[in-house]
Image (cartoon, coloured by chain):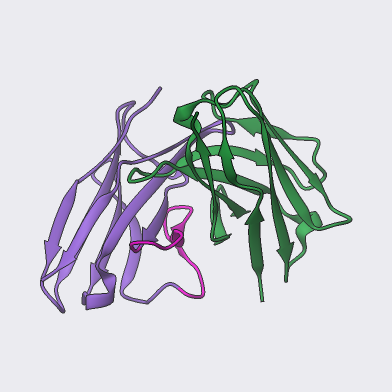
């Protein structure tokens, strides 16, 4: 069973830029893993920011973007706002019945 | 607007069963793949299962294979999750989510399942 790894925590200054990454124990992450990024604030349901590596939903703020970076999936936040303080999870899909979430990254805006 | 509303959660004893429902509205439910995702208290999410639009295709995480069964009633715009042989480690908030391109777009607010004696 592949393990999906994320930074446990990151801190960004208001207005600053931070990149969260998502790696796989089975090797490089590619577009074939269809990386998906979720944001979850305390006490709330997750909401999807990015799907299929780079695609945004209508509700995804423009300051969030998805990419592949050095064999990992990446979520970049440019121009952090206080409301971006949350837990962020990535999902990698290996097969139709093997879809694995990372352990999450807690982002603090400070 | 799109709405997904889960129900059916509660407290159940180990070894017991529970059926969750997810009422969908605001989109073409009968054309959509649908997921169940669960999240134990204080932990990250875990993907559980996906079902195809007509219900004929289902895929499960290894942790629930043979215990959980996903189904749907397109005439009622409702998704179900039948959970049997429940164990304390199945305790979680269970979310339904609409599929898009191997990921999710809309999520429900979840329903809490607690397996405890």
| Figure disc tally | 0
Q: Nearer the viewer, residue A4 or B2?
A: B2
Q: Give coordinates of residue A48: x percent, y percent.
A: 46, 61
The question of residue A89 being in magenta is answered with no
**Residue occupying image coordinates x 23% and y 44%:** A70
Q: Magenta: predominant secondary structure element? A: loop
- Residue found at the very far right of the displayed protein: B75
**Magenta-tinted stretch:** A41-59
Q: Nearer the viewer, residue A46 or A30?
A: A46
Q: Give coordinates of residue A25: x percent, y percent.
A: 30, 28
Q: Give coordinates of residue A50: x percent, y percent.
A: 43, 60
In green, which chain?
B
Above or below B36: residue B89:
above
Above or below A51: residue B14:
above
Q: Give coordinates of residue B45: x percent, y percent.
A: 42, 44
**Residue occupying image coordinates x 15% and y 56%:** A10
**Residue occupying image coordinates x 23% and y 72%:** A78
**Residue occupying image coordinates x 25% and y 49%:** A21
In purple, which chain?
A
In the displayed structure image, the side of residue B53 where residue A110 appears, left or right: left
Q: Quadrant of residue B24?
A: bottom right
The question of residue A51 being in magenta is answered with yes
Q: Is residue A83 visible?
A: yes
- Quarter of the image for the N terminus of chain B: give it: bottom right
Q: Nearer the viewer, residue B4 or B57?
A: B4
Q: Is residue A81 visible?
A: no
Above or below B35: residue A81:
below
Above or below A105: residue B107:
below
């Amino acid at each position: 069973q592949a393990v999906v790894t994320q930074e446990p925590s990151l801190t960004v200054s208001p207005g600053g830029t931070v990149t969260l990454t998502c790696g796989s124990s089975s090797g490089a992450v590619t577009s074939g893993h269809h990386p998906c990024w979720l944001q979850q604030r305390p006490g709330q349901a997750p909401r999807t920011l990015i799907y299929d590596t780079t695609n945004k939903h209508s509700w995804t703020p423009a300051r969030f973007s998805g990419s592949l970076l050095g064999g990992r999936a990446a979520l970049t936040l440019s121009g952090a706002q206080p409301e971006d303080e949350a837990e962020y999870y990535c999902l990698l899909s290996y097969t139709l019945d093997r879809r694995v979430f990372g352990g999450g990254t807690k982002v603090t805006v400070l | 607007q799109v709405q997904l509303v889960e129900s059916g959660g509660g407290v159940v004893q180990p070894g017991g069963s529970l059926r969750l429902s997810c009422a969908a509205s605001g989109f073409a439910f009968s054309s959509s793949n649908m997921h169940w995702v669960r999240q134990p208290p204080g932990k990250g999410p875990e993907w559980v299962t996906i079902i195809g639009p007509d219900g004929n295709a289902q895929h499960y995480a290894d942790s629930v294979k043979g215990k959980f069964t996903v189904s749907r009633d397109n005439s009622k715009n409702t998704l179900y999750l039948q959970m049997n042989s429940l164990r304390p480690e199945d305790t979680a908030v269970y979310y339904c989510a609409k599929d898009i391109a191997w990921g999710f777009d809309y999520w429900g607010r979840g329903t809490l399942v607690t397996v405890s004696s």
